[in-house]
Image (spheres, rainbow, N blue to C red):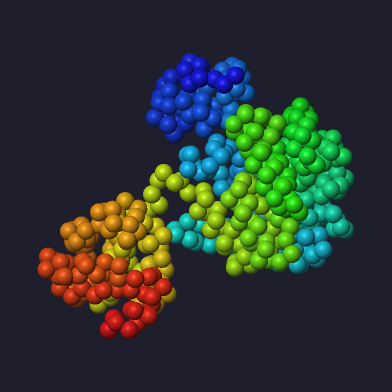
Amino acid sequence: MALTAMQIYKSLPKTNCKDCSLPTCMAFAMQVAAKRKALTECPHISSEAQGSLSEASSPPMKLVTLGTGENSFKTGQETVMFRHEEKFHTPCGIAVKINASLSDDEALGKLKKINNSVFTRVGAELKVSLCAIYLDGVSDPAARAKLISEKSKVPLILVSESPETMKKAVAVVKDKKPLLYKATASTIGAFIEIAADAKVPLAISGSTLEELADLTLQAKEKGITDLVLSFNTEKLGTTLKDITICRRAALKKNFRALGYPVIVDIIAETPEEETVVGSIFAAKYAGIIMIEHCEPWEILPILTTIQDVYTDPQVPNTVEAKLYEIGSPDESSPVMFTTNFSLTYFSVAGEVERSKIPSYIAVVDTEGLGVLNAYAGDKISVEQVVKTIKDQKVAEKVKHRKLIIPGLLPIFRAEIEDTSEWKEVIIGPETAREIPAFLAKSWK
């Protein structure tokens, strides 16, 4: 039976210490009751209270951590079926495969590409989260695991169908807390023993959801609580259906046997297909996706999908409204303004940087709306633009009084010239991609 917020509150310290990142103990109790916080996130709860309440109050989906310290990855602890209900909490991770057929030098070469697969998009860092080391067929699986672990900047997934092979590999890298992939009905006993001895997470696969639930219960009875449900995309539609059933069973029915994050092995004939299928499962509902390739053109669409799906829909995606300097602008550099919607600002800033013309960008606070939406919603006006530029002391930075305005706001031109010191207003392009050519042609 689910606990109420008041039942949970009675067992809390009631100090309102805010160490759980919430303002009061009652607020924390309400979040725990709603399955949005784990009871263990209160650092001051007594062991007696934790023991009596932990099972009933814990989130329906387990949070599983791979790796250690800064080099770790968390997955699970989701609370809703659909993003608009609240938000998704722990972004899906990409795991790139290092196949057993590769030589040591080739494996290290691919690992280097994995380590360097770090990108910046709208101010956020996107990267490959894990590497999956395939061990079956490697002459010395322990040596391969050790070699990769010493050079890897991301947590590890050890992949083998053989308990003997897995045991050898785990023995040399267990301090890295790798995920063991994967136990099946025929190997569950041996894999549970290996995972329990090494104290590492375990992925489990079942031929049916019923079998999968039985296997997770076996693991839990043996003390393995960090579990991941394993699927592949040989039957894509069936896998989508099964993952959705698992999530609904955990979140809506509180069915603990399937209350674990999901890892999906993407099986595709081409890199293009792998990208498409990977993006599908990144949005629906994989915690980890395993892919073969890590060329930027392939993984960036998946990373972009993850970034978009896992942003908080209730919080505007904004940048600070201030004056930004792109390059090293001087007193003769261009001045322009845009809104504080992250995608708008970073699109403009990126194209200005690409133009190789150092510039000033004055960002106007539009409550996270783009140019047209801000104008339609009365979140931007000439008065606001003029005040923002004045407050940011842009005029002190340059000798000229030329201001480039977004091409979608030509109506602002005359009024800005009439009401401000910016007497030459230039209508810029309507899209960011036109900025380099525009600046090269019009800014002399």
Specify whether 248 is left or right of 143. Answer: left
- Number of numbered discs visible in the structure rendering: 0
Percent position (x, y) of residue 345?
Answer: 37, 62
Residue depicted at 68% across the width and 44% down the height: 241
Residue furthest left in the image: 418
Percent position (x, y) of residue 332?
Answer: 25, 77
Give the quadrant of residue 251.
top right
Q: Quadrant of the C terminus?
A: bottom left
Specify whether 72 is left or right of 314. Answer: right
Q: Quadrant of the N terminus?
A: top right
Residue depicted at 56% across the width and 44% down the height: 90
Frontmost residue, 160 versus 396? 160
Question: Please, is residue 118 above or below residue 405 in the view?
Answer: above
Question: Please, is residue 19 above or below residue 372 in the view?
Answer: above
Question: Please, is residue 136 above or below residue 200 in the view?
Answer: below
Specify whether 365 is left or right of 176. Answer: left
The reply to whether residue 429 is visible in this rendering is yes
Specify whether 420 is left or right of 373. Answer: left
Question: Please, is residue 295 above or below residue 380 in the view?
Answer: below
Percent position (x, y) of residue 318?
Answer: 37, 53
The reply to whether residue 67 is visible in this rendering is no
Frontmost residue, 428 versus 66? 428
Residue depicted at 59% across the width and 31% down the height: 252
Give the quadrant of residue 184.
top right
Frontmost residue, 293 versus 392? 293
Percent position (x, y) of residue 190?
Answer: 85, 38
Residue depicted at 21% across the width and 58% down the height: 381
